[in-house]
Image (cartoon, rainbow, N blue to C red):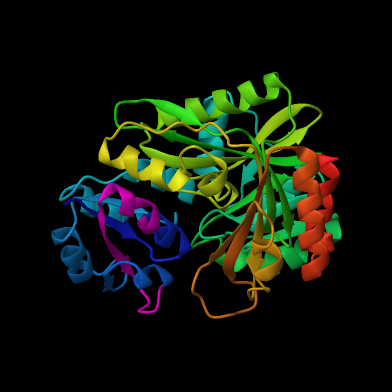
Amino acid sequence: MTTVGILGGGQLARMMALSGAPLGLRFRVLDNVADACAGQFAPMVVGDYTDGAALAEFASQVDVATFDFENVPAESARWLVERVPVFPTPRALAVAQDRLAEKTLFRELGIPVPEFADIPSREALDAAVGRLGTPCILKTRRLGYDGKGQFRIKSPTDVDAAWAALGPQAASVGLILEGFVHFERELSVVAVRGRDGEFRAWPLTENWHVDGVLSASLAPAAVDAALQASALSHARKLAEALDYVGVFALELFCRDGVLLANELAPRVHNSGHWTIEGSETSQFQNHLRAVLGLPLGDTRMIGLACMLNWIGAMPDAGPVLREAGGHWHDYGKSPREGRKVGHATLRADSPVELADALARVGAALGREAQVAPVVAALR
């Protein structure tokens, strides 16, 4: 029986283990905390990702290794790849960990991106703000996620505060300044590439965020064929350039009918959770198929789907489960402000049915504001 090793023991690893059970797979998880939620379904090695002894124990117990988050040190991935197959490759991980390297690669591949600049010093920040104009966003090159490690500069008078907030990190993780994008929509394409180079993608998804954290995802996004083709072309270019194996997400802004690349997530992705019930093959099972060299599953949708993220604490499951197409996912985490603790997916066969179901759930849970933009998009 094949054992898949996962670096990172969060909800993505948990859902990966659940999706791998029908394939007869076993799992081993490495995480630096003993109560990681994936440990409820797979044996764990507890240790730091840079701990040689923990890595050696982990490597001795698995046939192939993958990740559930992108901030696993690339050096640890390189150490592992000399002992077991590791997918995606350490290079893909390293590129996605550095916003400057990531956006430079986008530009080299001809994928449109917002204007950006490396910020090694306060003088460089002043010059870049003068060139890019305001508003703009100062970000850490590494380790930021879900809106963390960012400072929006609304006018030149904010530069002092931005540097005070993030400047001390310039030497350790680096900084990048990005031009602010006045986008109409936020989209993502979740795709998968197999060991043999086979490439598949799910329909383009529209996303809504609150305070930098994903709130809701709707698939398929209401886009024309040209925009869908453009997104798939960008994703395929990235996958081939990085010799990528596994599932990844390319986050995109849509402005004036043009897609601008925001970030590459080298893993299964929050905006693809709807694929569990809304697609012939989920992102989680296709990721496992890819890293194991198995044939990829069909990515066609089954009707329409909307994923609602639960942040901080789980609401009452009843209103979702009463819906014919309602599906509930509790990650088994203790409540905590800002923490992703679960999600729900509503699936329906028509936009009207899905909009009505979302409206009922939103009203019952007091989440009208969360579902309102999705309902508007459907109607």
Q: Residue at x 79, y 65 (%)?
A: 367
Residue 158 visible? The answer is no
User: For this view, does 154 lie left or right of residue 165?
Assistant: right
Q: Residue at x 54, y 35 (%)?
A: 104
* Residue 24, percent from left and from top: 25, 51
User: For this view, does 84 lie left or right of residue 137?
Assistant: left
Q: Residue at x 16, y 67 (%)?
A: 57
Viewer-proximal residue, 278 or 100? Answer: 278
Viewer-proximal residue, 68 or 138? Answer: 68
**35 in magenta:** yes
Viewer-proximal residue, 232 or 317? Answer: 317
* Residue 292, percent from left and from top: 26, 41
Quarter of image, res 232: top right
Question: Is residue 259 shown above or below 159?
Answer: above
The boundaries of the magenta stretch are 17-36
Residue 247 visible? The answer is yes
Q: Tag count in the figure?
A: 0
